[in-house]
Image (cartoon, rainbow, N blue to C red):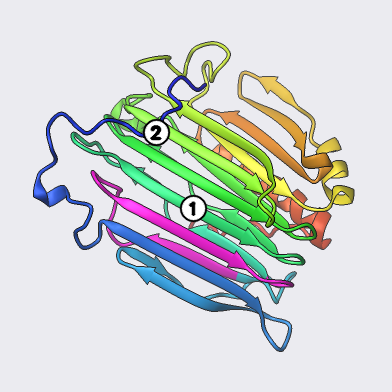
Amino acid sequence: MSHLSDTNLPPATNPPPMALSNSGVGKRGYLRLGFELGPEGRTILRTLDRRHPMVVQQALYWDEQLPHLASVYTLSSGGPLVDGDRYRWEVDVGPGAEAHVASGAATLIASMRYDRVEIEQRVKVAEGGYLEWLPEPTIPCSRSHSLTTTELTVARGGALFWADMLCCGRLYYGERFDFERLFRQTTLRRPDGQVVAREVADIVPSVVHPSTMGILGDFTHWATVVMVGPSEVIVPLNNNLHPYYTPNGALGTSLIGGGEAVVVRLLGHSAEGLKREVRGLCSQFRMATKGVPLDDDFPWR
């Protein structure tokens, strides 16, 4: 799927107007969430640092099966990501802490003429920590250009469920892989710097169209799920995931890291169907690690 591996692109032919300068207010979004185990055994959101347009709701404890799990929903008050936006996320889960992080709406990457969107995501899970990362899908609009780099650092004894869902565009408006470039690099490592796995997906429809056989084919939506934990949890979990390929969807798995991580790739035709599949995987992961399933999502979502 990768044809352009160099992310250091030459400057735009036409320099962007001052209104698109990424030094302006709201152009450099920042969010840092730090979860710690509180004195009464409940996970607390100890650190919260944000920069406009990032918005964070207070930690909620609505899950009756895991009453000490802190659930946090994030939002962006600035609407879609536009030319020149630079965003950085940092999520730290301390020893014994349990957290569920989700977004309140899909991430829309708007059309652009001059620049691109750059997003950095840094996730750290300490030994004994537990994190479920379940954002809504990302939708790249026509002529959009985005670069996303993700670093997942998980200590042995920590557990992480991380999902990334993507759409081909706004199908309602007739957009189907009309974006210029969608670059995503994901690295899974240990705290000592050891790289467990790295994936680079660099999709440039004008070079190689994603509908090509062997890439996405007829599918328009896809997701990548990374599950990390002790091998005695991950290996049986992987064995219970049965790869399939049908006209309605596909699933494939790769066991990595000596059996301490599994990468799952899902293909489908709708965001709703993909979200159900990803949430089902998260429920299996929680059952394997915590002994309880994930509750049904809220009706309003």
Q: Residue at x 86, y 48 (%)?
A: 231
x then y, percent, for residue 216: 53, 20
* Viewer can see residue 93: yes
Q: Earlier in the sequence, mark 2 or mark 1?
A: 2
36 lies left or right of 46: right
x then y, percent, for residue 228: 73, 49
* Viewer can see residue 221: no
Does 78 lie within the magenta span?
yes
Residue 90 vertical position relative to residue 219 in the rendered view, above or below: below
- Specify the amino acid type for callout 2: Thr
Q: Residue at x 68, y 29 (%)?
A: 251
Q: Residue at x 70, y 88 (%)?
A: 39
239 lies left or right of 81: right
- Residue at label 2? 7
Q: Residue furthest top?
A: 213
x then y, percent, for residue 161: 67, 52
Residue 245 vertical position relative to residue 34 in the rendered view, above or below: above
Does 87 lie within the magenta span?
yes
Q: Which of 257 and 251 is in front in this view?
A: 257
Q: How far apart are marks 2 and 1 (CA)?
A: 16 Å
Q: Residues within 10 Å of mark 1 (few under 14, many from 20)?
A: some
Q: Quadrant of residue 95?
A: bottom right
- Residue at label 1? 121
Range of the magenta residues? 71-97
Q: Give the structural element (helix, strand or loop) at label 2.
A: loop
Q: In which quarter of the image is residue 108?
A: top left
